[in-house]
């Protein structure tokens, strides 16, 4: 079964065959609380990674940034 992982640290990313990376704090791989629109977008982008990542060890940097202060 193909899998994709959402990582907030590139240090551990090589352990998964397909990775999408987000610049969010640990514990918040989908983004800020109460931002269902952004969380859904991250999930959809991760699922898209299942189709677009063909080489094991590939990491896709997602463009989202943590906005919460």
Image (cartoon, rainbow, N blue to C red):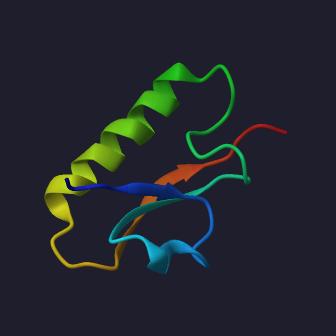
Q: Quadrant of residue 23?
A: bottom right
Task: Please determine whether, in this image, residue 52 is positioned above or below residue 36.
Answer: below
Work out whether 17 lies above or below 28.
below
| Residue visible at 33% across and 45% down in the picture | 45
Going 32% across and 37% down the picture, which residue do you hit?
44
Q: Position of residue 46 (x, y in %)?
A: 35, 48
Count of labels in the image? 0
> Residue 62 location, x and y as percent?
44, 57
**In the rendered view of the protein, which quadrant contains the C terminus?**
top right
Q: Which residue is found at the position 52% from the left and 21% from the top?
A: 36
| Left or right position of 3 against 59 | left
Provide residue 42's location: percent of width, then percent of height: 43, 41
What's the residue at 21%, 66% (across, down)? 53
Q: Could you say which is closer to the camera, residue 16 or residue 30?
A: 16
Please determine whether, in this image, residue 17 is positioned above or below residue 42: below
Residue 24 position in % (x across, y down): 66, 52
Classify residue 16 as left or right of residue 64: left
Q: Residue furthest right?
A: 69
């Amino acid at each position: 079964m193909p899998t994709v992982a959402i990582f907030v640290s590139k240090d551990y990313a090589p352990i998964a065959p397909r990775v999408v990376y987000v610049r969010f704090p640990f514990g918040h791989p989908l983004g800020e609380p109460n931002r269902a629109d952004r969380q859904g977008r991250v999930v959809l982008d991760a699922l898209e990674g299942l189709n677009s990542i063909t080489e094991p060890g590939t990491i896709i940097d997602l463009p989202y940034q943590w906005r919460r202060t």
